[in-house]
Image (cartoon, helix red, strand yellow):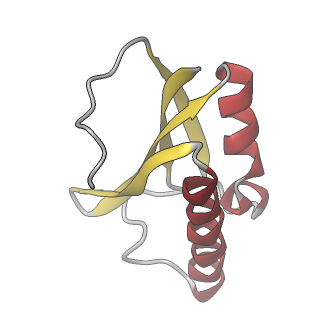
Amino acid sequence: MAYFFLRLQPPRPTFPHDGTGEEMAAMKRHAEYWHRNALAGSAIIVGPVFEGEGAWGMAIVEVEDQAAAQVLADGDPIIASGFGFRFDILPMPSIISRPPAV
């Protein structure tokens, strides 16, 4: 298995503060998608990162290879929405992780 950092780039630097109703509905589907991937075990951690006047999204995933990480990114409803979001997929050759909470 391999680890990847996925950075979700928003369509503009002020997103989500100026998100339209349609964009925010698509973001709800995006969150539901990643919640399912977390429950399935491929998404380790997912969430927004606020920076400056806006935010971007991040996920750390554990999958077979970069092609599998690309499949996860491509399957995100926010990508299919056509609103201009895109993922950067970056390999993480090693990680240090705390033990699972008991």
In the image, residue 53 above or below residue 67: below
Q: Nearer the viewer, residue 6 or 68?
A: 68
Residue 42 horizontal/vertical position (percent):
59, 42
Q: Residue furthest front?
A: 102
Q: Report which quarter residue 99 is drawn in.
A: top left
Q: Nearer the viewer, residue 36 or 82?
A: 36
Q: Quadrant of the C terminus?
A: bottom left
Residue 23 horizontal/vertical position (percent):
61, 76
Q: Quadrant of the N terminus?
A: top right
Residue 5 horizontal/vertical position (percent):
45, 32
In the rendered structure, the answer to whether residue 62 lies left or right of residue 81 reads: left
Residue under the point 50% across and 27% down = 4
Residue under the point 70% across and 55% down = 76
In the rendered structure, the answer to whether residue 44 lies left or right of residue 68 reads: left
In the image, residue 102 above or below residue 61: below
Q: Report which quarter residue 65 is drawn in.
A: top right
Q: Residue furthest top?
A: 93
Residue under the point 21% across and 56% down = 52
